[in-house]
Image (cartoon, grey):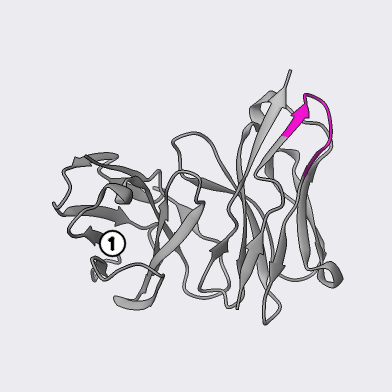
Amino acid sequence: AQSVTQLGSHVSVSEGALVLLRCNYSSSVPPYLFWYVQYPNQGLQLLLKYTTGATLVKGINGFEAEFKKSETSFHLTKPSAHMSDAAEYFCAVSPTGNQFYFGTGTSLTVIP
Amino acid sequence: EAGVTQSPTHLIKTRGQQATLRCSPISGHTSVYWYQQALGLGLQFLLWYDEGEERNRGNFPPRFSGRQFPNYSSELNVNALELEDSALYLCASSLRQGFAEAFFGQGTRLTVV
C-alpha cells in the first residue's frame, strides 16, 4: 500500500529563516514524488518532482527537495522564507505513474 | 495553453439534491482525477478516468459517480447530497504515460445547506 505522511500540520517560520517541511512515504515500488503548493481558494500548483536521476531536485520559487531512499523521505526546503511562501504544501507519491496519493498537507505561516 | 478548467466555481445545493461538477483537462491529457478537499482532511482521492474508462475509485459511497467523455472532459455527480459533502472538489489531469505530474484546476466549492 502507498501512503504519504507529512509531519507537522502547521509550521511557522520567521521571514528569512530556513523552511523545512517533512514528508515520508511508503511504497511497494520505487515511487515518483511531488511537492505541490496551494494558495487560499486555489488549486494545487506543482513545486517540484522527483522521477529518476539526481536525488536533489530544484523547483520553483527557490524550493528544493532531496529524495532519500534509505529514509523513505522527500523533505522540502528553502533557505530563506518569504512572506509570499505562506500557503498549504502537499507531498504526493505516485508509485505507478497513474495514481497520486497525497499527504494531509502542511500549512506554512511566515512571521514578519 | 489553457490549463485545467472547472465549472462552476461555486455551487450551493440543498441536502438531498444532486450536484454536477465539470472539468476540462489540458489539451492532450487523457487522464482526469477527482479529489475532495474537505476542511482539515487534505485531499481525498475520489475517481480516476482515463481514455473514457473509470480506472480506480477511492473510498467513497456509490452516490459519488462520474464519467469521462470522448473529448476527455469529465463530470462528477454527487447524488443525495449530505451536509458533509461540502468541500472543495479539485480536478486534475495528466498525460497517460511517462509518469507526468498532475495539473490541477481551481476547484469547485460545493456548499450543501
Left or right of B78? Residue A103 is right
Does residue B71 belong to the magenta stretch? no
The answer to whether one can see residue A50 in this image is yes
Q: Crowding near pointer 1: few (<14 within 10 Å), some, many (20+)?
A: many
Left or right of B14? Residue B64 is right
The answer to whether one can see residue B32 in this image is no
Relative to B77, does residue A43 appear above or below in the rendering? above
Q: Residue sitting at 49 percent across and 55 percent down?
A: B43
Relative to A64, does residue B66 appear above or below in the rendering? below
Residue B20 sits in which quadrant? bottom left
Rendered location of residue B1, percent (x, y): 42, 48
Left or right of B110? Residue A18 is right
Q: Residue sitting at 25 percent across and 67 percent down?
A: B65
Q: Residue furthest bottom?
A: A28
Residue A82 sits in which quadrant? top right
Residue, disc 1: B73
Instruction: Please name whichever residue, A49 or A100, is drawn nearer the observer in this view of the structure.
Output: A100
Q: Residue furthest top?
A: A112
Relative to B1, does residue B58 appear above or below in the rendering? below
Question: Start and end of the magenta stretch?
Answer: A12-20
Does residue A14 belong to the magenta stretch? yes
Q: Residue sitting at 24 percent across and 71 percent down?
A: B70
Instruction: Please name whichever residue, A42 or B95, is drawn nearer the observer in this view of the structure.
Output: A42
Residue type at the position of mark 1: Ser
Relative to A99, does residue B75 appear above or below in the rendering? above
Rendered location of residue B86, percent (x, y): 32, 46
Q: Secondary structure at mark 1?
A: loop
Rendered location of residue A37, percent (x, y): 59, 44
Q: Quadrant of the C terminus of chain B?
A: top left
Q: Mark 1 belongs to which subunit? A: B
